[in-house]
Amino acid sequence: MKRLYLTVEGQTEQEFAISVLQGHLAGFNVFLTRPRLTGLHSRWRGRIPSGGLLHTFGHTLRDIRIWLREDQSDDARFSMMVDLYHLPHDFPGYEAGMARQTGWEQAEALEQSLSEAVGDARFIPHLQVHEFEALVLTDAARIEGLYPARAGGISQLDDECQAYESPEDINHGHQSHPKARIFQRVPEYDENVAGPLLAHDIGLPRLRAACPHFGRWLTRLEQLDLPT
């Protein structure tokens, strides 16, 4: 048995972990505790901002190190869900990592840099390529089930997504990253509610197939309790 502690940057990832990942991983003898909001989220007197790490990663790194010290047992493991999009520039290895050509290469290089900075083999870094909403765009047409009045715009959004080999490829600037594309078509989109619901509806098999970087992380979590 392994206990998994997860650090997340917002309510969307927290709810996704509880409603989608928790039950799935239990089947692999990996028991996910309630994910912790990192840094500034935990310092705003209980009021949770909309999400993101704002302008610094330093507070998140300090939180991770504190949590690692809280449970030093051999059956404890630690991971995180943080967006690559708008990643703060003080992230370990930021300049060298972001110089890589693709989002997957950037994420993998930055994850390696963070792993070295943390220096604990129990910690498994994970950066969403390029953000959580890429999972939703695995099947953008399903958004219509929650917002039927926006059917026309959602159909156009779905057509846009079909042009990409993977929704993890979608990131072309401030107005065209995955979340921005959704808000342009569905201004009332509630990311903290709709995001986890849609990811649950799409299902982990399709999510991991469409989003290979996410899929590799999920596989690693599923294998935590296997003999080494």
Image (cartoon, rainbow, N blue to C red):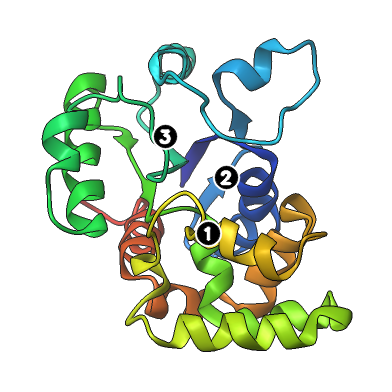
Seen in the picture, residue 222 relative to 142 is either above or below; the reply is above
SS label for mark 3: strand
Q: CA distance from mark 3 to mark 2?
A: 10 Å
- Residue 186 % position (x, y): 75, 67
Contact between labelled residues 2 and 3, with CB atoms less than 8 Å apart: no
How many C-alpha atoms fall within 10 Å of the one at disc 3: few (<14), some, or many (≥20)? many
The residue at 61%/30% (across/down) is 36
Contact between labelled residues 3 and 1, with CB atoms less than 8 Å apart: no
Residue picked out by circle 2? 32
Q: Between residue 98 and residue 72, name the one nearer to us.
A: 98
Mark 1 or 2 closer to N-term?
A: 1
- Residue 24 % position (x, y): 57, 65
Residue picked out by circle 3? 78
Q: CA distance from mark 1 to mark 3?
A: 14 Å
Three-letter amino acid code of the residue under disc 1: Leu
Three-letter amino acid code of the residue under disc 2: Leu
Q: CA distance from mark 1 to mark 2?
A: 7 Å
In this rendering, would 145 be left or right of 90? right
Mark 3 or 2 closer to N-term?
A: 2
In this rendering, would 170 be left or right of 132? left
Residue picked out by circle 1? 25
Three-letter amino acid code of the residue under disc 3: Phe
How many C-alpha atoms fall within 10 Å of the one at disc 2: few (<14), some, or many (≥20)? many
Mark 1 or 3 closer to N-term?
A: 1
The residue at 32%/57% (across/down) is 220
